[in-house]
Image: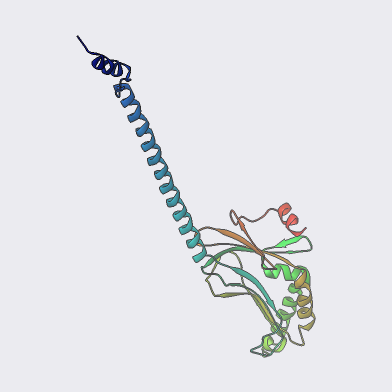
């Protein structure tokens, strides 16, 4: 027979709650949650690594673009400091960090576009009449160096030529003389009314258009603009 003290201890043990152990279902659930957390962390780490790699590639491309970027500028002067003479010089220079393939230089005057400097100067200033006059003088007076006596000019084709970084390309040059002073002054005055669009590409095929004010715009390609597009550029 249990005494009163033993009976009390038995009742206390009976009232104490039993500890619940981890069931297999709970363990599987915990493992599943851990797997999800680890998978999410791994995915996020992979995402960060991929993003960092993309940023590195983009930065490398930007650096390469900057290292090969041609920066073209249209230039005009009417005086040669070295020779101390009045001398028209229309040129284009490259002050960038890479060479440029100049596809064309378009000259727009009175809503007409020209792809050669002589066509432009004949349109604005009757250059062909001057050429014909010089040809007649050369034929009639062969013993005279008409180029020194009357003045001549030099022009260059400006389609599809390579302009290295740090170089200058002379488009048109003309020294002022007593014989050509009228034409020379007419060119010098009219040139400021001419709009220019020179399209060129870098060695990485990034293409740009620079105008007579040295404003540069990136474009998809250097296709020649159509007539209606040319008129829009002049507005």
Q: Please tell me which residue is depicted at 39% across the width and 40% down the height of the picture.
A: 41
Up-down relation of residue 148 to residue 12 (above or below): below
How far from the left and from the top, in percent, is residue 146? 69, 86
Up-down relation of residue 188 to residue 82 (above or below): above
Q: Please tell me which residue is depicted at 79% across the width and 63% down the height of the picture.
A: 110
Q: Residue furthest top?
A: 1
Up-down relation of residue 82 to residue 198 (above or below): below
Q: Residue furthest left?
A: 1
Given residues 31 and 7, the one toward you in this image is: 7
Looking at the rendering, which quadrant does residue 143 occupy?
bottom right
| Placement of the N terminus among the 4 image quadrants | top left
How far from the left and from the top, in percent, is residue 158? 61, 67
Number of callouts: 0
How far from the left and from the top, in percent, is residue 53? 42, 51
How far from the left and from the top, in percent, is residue 108? 73, 63
Q: Residue furthest front?
A: 4
Q: Is residue 142 left or right of residue 178?
A: left
Q: Is residue 56 left or right of residue 80?
A: left
| Placement of the C terminus among the 4 image quadrants | bottom right
Instruction: Tell me if residue 152 can be seen.
Output: yes
Give the colour scheme of this rendering. Answer: rainbow
Looking at the rendering, which quadrant does residue 180 occupy?
bottom right
Instruction: Tell me if residue 68 can be seen.
Output: no
Up-down relation of residue 113 to residue 43 (above or below): below
Q: Please tell me which residue is depicted at 43% across the width and 44% down the height of the picture.
A: 47
Given residues 200 and 44, the one toward you in this image is: 44
């Amino acid at each position: 027979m249990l005494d009163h003290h033993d009976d009390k201890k038995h009742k206390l043990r009976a009232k104490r709650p039993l500890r619940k152990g981890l069931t297999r279902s709970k363990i599987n659930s915990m493992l599943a949650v851990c797997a999800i957390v680890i998978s999410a962390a791994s995915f996020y780490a992979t995402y960060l690594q991929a993003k960092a790699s993309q940023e590195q590639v983009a930065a490398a491309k930007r650096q390469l673009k900057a290292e090969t970027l041609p920066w073209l500028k249209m230039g005009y002067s009417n005086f040669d400091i070295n020779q101390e003479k009045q001398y028209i010089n229309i040129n284009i220079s490259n002050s960038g960090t890479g060479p440029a393939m100049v596809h064309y230089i378009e000259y727009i005057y009175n809503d007409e576009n020209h792809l050669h400097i002589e066509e432009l100067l004949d349109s604005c200033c009757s250059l062909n009449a001057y050429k014909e006059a010089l040809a007649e003088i050369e034929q009639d007076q062969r013993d005279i160096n008409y180029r020194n006596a009357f003045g001549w000019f030099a022009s260059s084709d400006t389609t599809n030529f390579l302009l290295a970084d740090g170089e200058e390309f002379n488009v048109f040059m003309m020294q002022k003389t007593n014989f050509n002073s009228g034409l020379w002054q007419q060119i010098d005055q009219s040139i400021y009314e001419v709009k220019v669009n020179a399209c060129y590409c870098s060695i990485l095929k990034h293409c740009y258009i620079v105008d007579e004010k040295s404003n540069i715009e990136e474009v998809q390609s250097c296709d020649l603009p159509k007539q209606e597009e040319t008129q829009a550029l002049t507005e």
